[in-house]
Amino acid sequence: MKKPLYIFSNGQLRRKDNTIFFVNEEGDQKYIPVEDTSELMIFGEVDLNKRFLEFCTQKEIMIHYFNNYGYYSGTFYPREHYNSGYMILRQAEAYLDDERRLVLARQFVNGAYLNIRQVLKYYVNRGKDVESKLTEIERLSEGIKDADNIPQLMAFEGNIREQYYKAFDAIHGQPEFIFEGRSKRPPKNEMNTLISFGNSIVYSTVLSEIYKTHLDPRIGYLHTTNFRRFSLNLDVAEIFKPILVDRVIFTLISKKMLKKSDFKKESGGLMLKESGRRVFVEELENRLKTTINHRDIGTPVSYRRLIRLELYKLEKHLMGEKDYETFVSQW
């Protein structure tokens, strides 16, 4: 099974015959198994050339770039082999129709809320003092169905997440990782650094799965389609961030797999060192590979596969075959 390859070091990526290899700053070479690689996630300063990119296009390997803080910067998107004019038209039609766009945007927000709710219920059942936040989030969710436009939906989602974030400290129980509220670009403390880092990886993971469908990632519904390169991956990621990124963060902190020493100050903010990034990525990839029994199809599927199934459901909705309903975790 193909899997992502993460590159944290500085160096060069090069092609040699029918394979590729990475050369670090010390001159050490590491060959990369092309047939087993789904995408490259580049966090270091890495040089590459046209010959290398042509080979990645041939092998359908995406390259995702992240900046110094671990924020998503951009993607080398190989030639789209599943491009469908029909699907692009269906996506555009749904976006340009305000009512149809609102239906899909509401599903993404509701899916995010329901999975946030499931995370909180999971920890309530384990004795964590988050019941009041769960009650408040359930109250706020009543506004989702009544929202008349996208800005209203975004506001309800923002209020829900604000309450949800206030439950984080009670969940992980580690005083050195106090939240103190959301901050980005740059993140001001360890918890914000972890959230931003994890979200960036999930955005890229969803984008890689979109590439394997007929959908065009440039046409989203909750996030406005404009001059931003991609937006559909941001929509779909909203559903999965609570059950992927947040659950991983709680595991890493509660099990003390990350320490204060895994972070460093940089340009007025805080960032993960390479040691911390490797621990985070390993745990997130383990989560993505974890299989669960899917109640609808009756067979075990991985969380990564769940993302693809979500995209297939969206395709069916756009083709008028079945109304789209987001995935909601039951465990």
Image (cartoon, rainbow, N blue to C red):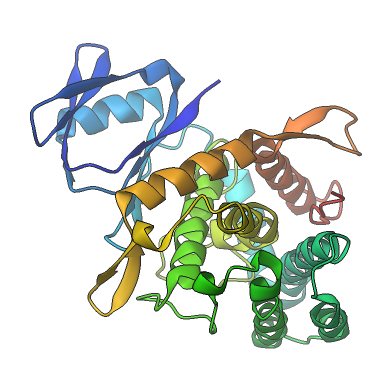
Placement of 312 over or under 173, stated as above or below: above
Residue closest to the far top:
17
Can residue 103 be seen? yes
Tell me where residue 196 appears, x and y as whole percent. 47, 65
Placement of 204 over or under 2, stated as above or below: below
Tell me where residue 83 appears, x and y as whole percent. 52, 39
Tell me which corner region of the image, top left, top right, bottom left or bottom right, holds residue 130. bottom right
Q: Is residue 101 left or right of residue 120?
A: left
Q: Is residue 172 left or right of residue 185?
A: right
Tell me where residue 279 appears, x and y as whole percent. 45, 45
Tag count = 0
Placement of 318 over or under 190, stated as above or below: above
Q: Quadrant of the N terminus?
A: top right
- At 42% across and 77% down in the image, what residue appears? 184
- At 48% across and 62% down in the image, what residue appears? 194
- At 39% across and 50% down in the image, what residue appears? 277
Instruction: Work out whether residue 19 or residue 102 is closer to the camera in this orientation and state it.
Output: 19
Tell me where residue 298 appears, x and y as whole percent. 90, 30
Can residue 143 be seen? no
Tell me which corner region of the image, top left, top right, bottom left or bottom right, holds residue 126. bottom right
